[in-house]
Amino acid sequence: MKCAKITGVCAVAVAVLAFQSVPAFGEEYVLRAEPLAKAMPDGRLVPMWGFALEAAFGEQNGEVTSPGPRLTVSNVDPRLVIRLDNNLPVPISIVIPGQIAAMTPVRNGDGRARSFTHETPPGNTEPVVYTWENFRPGTYLYHSGTHAAVQVQMGLYGAAVRDSDAGLAYNGVGYQQEALLLLSEIDPDLHDAVAADDYGPDKGTTSTIDYEPQYFLINGQTNDGTFDPIPIAAQDQPTLLRFLNAGLKTRAPIVLGMYMDVVAEDGYLYPYRKKQVAITLPALKTIDALVVPPADGIYPVFDRRLGLTNGKNAPGGMLRHLVAAAGAQLSVAPESRNVLNAVGQTTFDVANVGTGDMEWTAEVMEGGGWLSITDGSSGTNAGTITLQFTAHGDYCNDRTGTIRVTAPGATASPQDVTVVQAAAPLPGDANGDKIVDVADLGILAANYGTTSGMTWADGDFTGDEAVDVADLGILAGNYGQSPCAAAGITLNFDEAYRQTFGTAPSHLADDSQEAKPAEAPISAACGILGTVLVALILFGFFLLPVGCKG
Amino acid sequence: MTTNRSRRVAVMAVPVLALLALAPSVSAMVPETPGPPFNFTARAGHISTADGGSLLMWGYANGDGIMQYPGPNIVVTQGDLVTVVLTNQLPVPTSIVFPGQVEVAASGGTAGLLTQEAAPGETVTYTFTAAEAGTYHYHSGTRPDLQIEMGLVGAIVVRPQGAMGMHMAYPHMGAAFDREYLFLFTEIDPRIHDLVECGQMDEVDNADYFPVYWFINGRNAPDTMADNFAPWLPSQPYACMPMMHPGDRMLMRIISAGRDLHSFHTHGNNFTIIARDGRLLESAPGLGPDLAESNFTISVTPGGTADAIFTWTGEKLGWDIYGHQQDIDNEPLGDFPGPGDIDHNNDGIFDNVPMEDHEYAPDHGKPFPVVLPDVKDLTFGGMYSGSPFLGAMGFLPPGEGGMNPHAGFMYMWHSHLEKEMTNNDIFPGGLMTMPLVVPHHVEIMH
């Protein structure tokens, strides 16, 4: 009786608490599970299953990724709710090892457990809800609890974290900055088998016993030579590294250039910190470690079990750079773009390679007449600046536009990058020396009659890949033009022609060719006229000195 | 066979100990490479496996010497400025990284993912201050997936400052040792070496890695037990045959230089892990290894190191391996228990036979519990002295034994991933060695 009374009191207390917790202030996430095709650096498209973060159930517009989105539980309210939307062909669920939740396993007809907890059926029209009322602080993996042998390796995993207090991962473990390193592996053959419905009893692949990963990823990214840096706090400031292994094999992350103070494992704080450079990270394990860079700079982190290839290609795999920099650090790449003289677009990438957040703006400082920002004139942290430019009509000079990116408070700000647009090519100027002269005629003559594979430098000024009479006409029409410098022509066209082709054009005047003044404009019509004239030359009916006065 | 030799041993031990005191390098059993500065050359060569095979390797040579596996031991003192000049004579770019060393400066060559790299024919220089005592390693920072496998690894030992001639792994008495040995573990998949030798490097598949050779200090057992610099192993100069006296604190400097975990097991006795990755297991600086762990297997994280103290005394065998005669009742002398008589094992019987250094008192004088079969019913190993007692010789048939002249106690230490005790499927071999405990009067020389 005594016991019953106490139980009753407790039940009332729980009911009161439950009542008080409505409305819930805990974190609520809507996740949508869906197939995705992940491109590997060697071009292989791997069918995967991933999660997308949705603003609301049914919106179906979040980007599907594997690993799925990071779930952060408030350090004030310990409640985590996940509403699941399943666009996969199979039932799925979500479990978080290390966290207490009401588990209701689902069994196949023969009694074998299929799912550790209640399932979300394919194509559900109402969200299926998974709730953790008292999320323990720490670093954890969430993953599918249904047919986990298949679904986890297909990509249904992600990180769920909760701090014990603001800026405090655990009691006594404060940090300035944090970085998540979620390690995973992909055996693409298994993925292909699952995607092709060739996985299961009596099918081509019956189990994961031959699991042999080919790709090794950190935060869903292999090292393909252009991996994103992972920002950490600046010199002498602590950064919490949260390591998680979602793969099926033991990994050994190692950091060069500094020590890790390993503070926790599976979300449980060690009584003492362990100073290590490498850690053993078995499947499903999470380990938290503090690093304090002795100086600003780059600290590589990689898998010392040597998952450092992409298939047979290397370097690759689990390798990233931890970048220690004071606060936000602006990076704009590349420093310069070279563009052609025609109308077109180009882009620059903006990134924050430091810590914290950075607001930036971009403006054209020089070249506003021909260069304009069509997209990305401002942003937060990473972004892309898109620029449009007009055609360049000047034959003589390249032109340079300058774009200034300013991120107030960030190091390396402002930064100027340039767009260099090449000068327009002078018609008839095969060798690009800005003078149409005998040297160009020589090039044209050497290739005359070739009907394919020709370029401007070979004497093809019409762009038809052939060097023919049309090109000769253009050259003739502009012969002697040197719009960019004082003329240095010593031969008139007749002389040039004679020396080049060995025969004289039937042309009488020898004083008709003079170097044209630099400001002489050259028109397309002029070229056409030249073509006509040269056609006449070739037929021996030369009538007039060749030249254009516009 | 059971004789009381303790007095004789005691008499001999005095001059031997005096000699030991005068020769501080006697237990420096990690061979040292002259330097700093160190001039290494990365080049190709071949090693011998203990089953008679030969493998193409890429390794670091000291100066213009031959390729060696592992690379030359870098043994320096805390505070030393360490310069390593690497000249690359390999057909591919290469480099060195020094895990656990901070602010390593690299100059020359071209920037790689982990450090500056030397193209074939180029030279690159690395400089760092050996800031903290400990056991570390170095390896290639270029294509580590291939180049560590090919052999570009080596050991670093940083000795503490101010040890004043004492043998200390770290600046604390809890890290004092009598002798030390290096245990650098690696593994090899020979298919990779064959592909590289045949110019098919691009065919190497990291994903189906399947090693069949396992190494301590670049040698498979039983070659692990040959001498340092054994002339028939020119590319594998470093041995691992731990020798000790009863009670010695033997420092095991363990380096996991390959990619796999190896569950290394010291039969019969635990060891105490005092440090990992060159840092004492201490709860606060200066306290010494108060967080030390006692274990009988150790799996060091690849890329990591561990320092462990192993001590053998014969404790708790339940019999007296030192071969003292059974307790002597001195009553007939009429002075029982007379001066000098002690009841070592608390059985009510006193004697005046002194204990060995480090002997476990409760077993003092306890008889060997087995009646040895007749020699006609025994088979003999080369290491058997004919007696179960340490330092004692016994009857052996002609042609038997003879390889253990000091009648030491020898047994096996090995990877407890049992298949790693093979050389390409042939047992015994692989990641295995046999430590030897010899009586105190025997001087251990290396």
Image (cartoon, coloured by chain):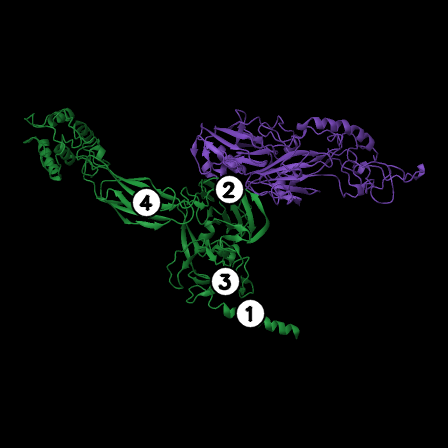
A123 versus A344 height, above or below = below
Name the residue type under label 1.
Val
Disc 1: host chain: A
Sequence-wise first label, 1 or 3: 1
Instruction: Determine which residue is flagged by label 4.
Output: A405
Labels 4 and 3 within one chain: yes
Q: Secondary structure at mark 4?
A: strand
**Sooner in the amino-acid sequence: mark 4 or mark 1:** 1
Q: Under tag 2, what secondary structure?
A: strand
Q: Nearer the viewer, residue B158 or A517?
A: B158
Three-letter amino acid code at disc 4? Val
Q: Which residue is mark 3?
A: A79
Q: Colour of chain B?
A: purple
2 or 4: mark nearer the eye: 4
Q: Are marks 1 and 3 in contact (CB under 8 Å)?
A: no
Q: Depth-wise, is mark 2 or mark 1 nearer the camera?
A: 1
Closer to the chain start, of discs 2 and 1, is 1
Say which label, 4 or 3, has the lower sequence index.
Answer: 3
What secondary structure is marked by label 1?
helix
Which mark lies nearer to you, 2 or 3? 3
Q: CA distance from mark 4 to mark 3?
A: 42 Å
In the figure, the green chain has which letter? A
Marks 4 and 1: same chain? yes
Q: Amino acid at mark 2?
A: Val
Instruction: Name the residue carrying label 2.
Output: A255
Q: Is residue A201 visible?
A: no
Residue A14 is tagged as: 1
* Image-quadrant location for residue B261: top right
Q: Farthest residue in the front direction?
A: A409
Circle 3 sits in a helix, a strand or a loop, which is it?
A: loop
The residue depicted at 17 percent of the width and 33 percent of the height is A428
Which marked residue is nearer to the observer: mark 4 or mark 3?
4
